[in-house]
Amino acid sequence: MRPLLPLGALLLAALPASLQARDYGQRGAVFPVIERDLLEQIHTRLAQMEKSGETAKLNQELKRRTIARVNRPDPVAGLIRAHESRSWPFDPTITLAADIREAKGELIHAAGTRVNPLDSVALRVPLLFLDGDDPAQIAWALRQDPNAKLILVKGAPLELMKARQRRFYFDQGGNLTEKFGIRAVPARVRQNGRVLEVSEIALPPRKAKP
């Protein structure tokens, strides 16, 4: 019995002679690969930056920008000062996309059920949205319910907390104002039964500077 040839040898033998490998010699100049490893390049660049002090400068700039962003976040885009008062109801009812179950697996609400969060958790204090750079809006907010949550759409919350001895929040990215449909400030959100009442409040016009 003849020994079995490896599969590669069988395939090579089955190829026509015209398709089998040939040595055609050297065609054109051949150059060695001289590209440096990417990680080595990065390491070298970082070492140069560290030595020149550029890394320290970048770290300081990053720190400065971070502190500036915390002290004064980006204002919520698209909001104006209210020039007329208006109010509307906001129904927070949602339709569940999946079953809600307890830790032991017992079904609480089935998918497709409409649930109003206010039936379980009340909005105990109003939410006040305001421009922290407008003294009139700050004064208005401080005259309201002393337990209200003060939410800035513009301004420096840390400075105001220190100056007014009240906690100020910030509507980062305008998530809340967008959700409630608020287009002007100051604005107030408070519970009215099973819906929320959203109001934009027009304050007296600003006095022109002499």
Image (tube, grey):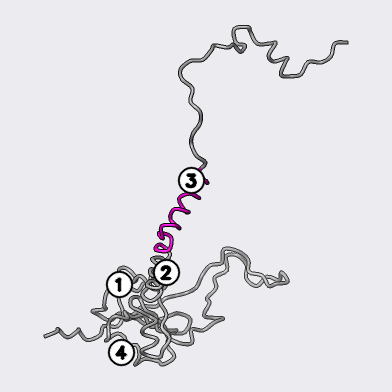
**Residue 36, position as x, y percentages in the image:** 50, 39
Give the answer, above or below, for where 142 lies relative to 180: below
- Of the image marks 4 and 1, the number of the one nearer the N terminus: 1
Kindly identify the amino acid type of the residue bearing the numbered disc 1. Answer: Leu
Kindly identify the amino acid type of the residue bearing the numbered disc 3. Answer: Gln
SS for callout 2: helix
Residue ID for mark 4? 139
State how far apart marks 2 and 4 are (Cα): 33 Å
Q: Residue at x 55, y 73 (%)?
A: 115
SS for callout 1: loop
- Of the image marks 2 and 1, the number of the one nearer the N terminus: 2
**Residue 192, position as x, y percentages in the image:** 44, 84
State how far apart marks 4 and 1 are (Cα): 19 Å
- Is residue 55 on the magenta stretch? yes
**Residue 200, position as x, y percentages in the image:** 31, 80
Magenta residue span: 38-58
Residue ID for mark 1? 79
State how far apart marks 3 and 4 are (Cα): 58 Å
SS for callout 4: helix
Residue ID for mark 2? 63
Kindly identify the amino acid type of the residue bearing the numbered disc 4. Answer: Ala
